[in-house]
Image (cartoon, helix red, strand yellow):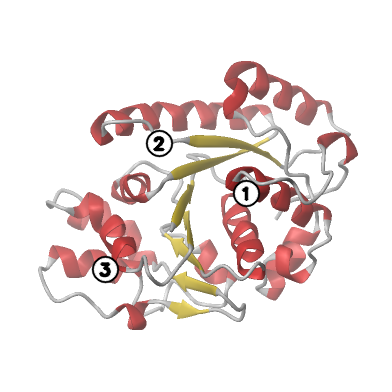
Amino acid sequence: MNIWAVANQKGGVGKTTTAVTLAGQLAAEGQRTLLVDLDPHGSLTTYFGFDPDSIDVSVYTLFKDRADRRPRTQYRDVLRATACENLTLLPASTALATLDRQLGTQDGMGLVLAQTLADLQAHFDHVLIDCPPMLGVLMVNALAACHRLLIPVQCEFLALKGLERMLHTLKMISRARGGEVPRVIVPTLYDRRTRASVDTLNVLRERYGSEVWSDVIPVDTQFREASKLGRPLSLWQPRARGSLAYLALLDTLLGRASHTAFGEHALDGQALA
């Protein structure tokens, strides 16, 4: 089972879009795919039509079971089927926002997700974790569980500061983990028509070299339309510009030959949801 976490300590960089679109492509290829929402805002949960304010059983329940030393809630009661074949959701609730204050200092809280995914290993081929934009027990759980970290970075200069904070956080967590998490920096919201996008992409590549994915995710209004429908763009419009970009990223992550001759110089667009 491949486990990838999608994280950045800056919001609005395309974390949820990245998790959803990659998951949709994997599901379309027949891969049993689990999406895990660790963000108290619940954007991923909302994307698939569930309400994080009123959901009764969620990923929060798994943490509470561990903290209260009670029998674990049955996974069939926590996992939610989506309208997309091969795509399952482990939803968030807004109660996750209280997790650090209520339970964060208790023993074993940093490994709840890793233990959950170990139990589910026979049921899924791939897991994508949508992380909260802050350091805390949820981020620690994601990094303890994942095999690879994807860091979406918006192609604008303020996002570079968010990346610096994220990499500083990773250094601290890597020391506790006993080794670095393999990572890929993914340039998002790229618009070749703007100087800000072009310059930011150049800075990313100069500073971080081979850690930066060799391609980019373009701005594309179709991401927003897909979110309104509650379907990954990769399933709804597989030939859309954004879908092809994420397919190229997936090919890179899986180490396979690219399905498409996608490249930054062919990009154009308007907005990434």
Where is residue 11? Give x, y as percent.
55, 45
Q: Real-space Cα distance between discs 2 and 3?
A: 24 Å
Where is residue 77? Give x, y as percent.
34, 83
Q: Which residue lies furthest to the top in this view?
A: 206
Label 1 residue SS? loop
Answer left or right for 183 relative to 57: right
Answer left or right for 263 relative to 257: right
For image coordinates 24% across by 78% down, the residue present is 73
Name the disc covering residue 265, or none: none
Instruction: Choose the circle earlier in sequence order: 1 or 3.
Output: 1
For image coordinates 17% across by 65% down, the residue present is 66
Disc 3 marks a residue whose amino acid type is Leu
| Nearer to me, 9 or 253 | 253
Q: In which quarter of the image is residue 224?
A: bottom right
Identify residue for label 2.
181
Label 3 residue SS? helix
Identify residue for label 1.
14
For image coordinates 45% across by 62% down, the residue present is 37
Label 2 residue SS? loop
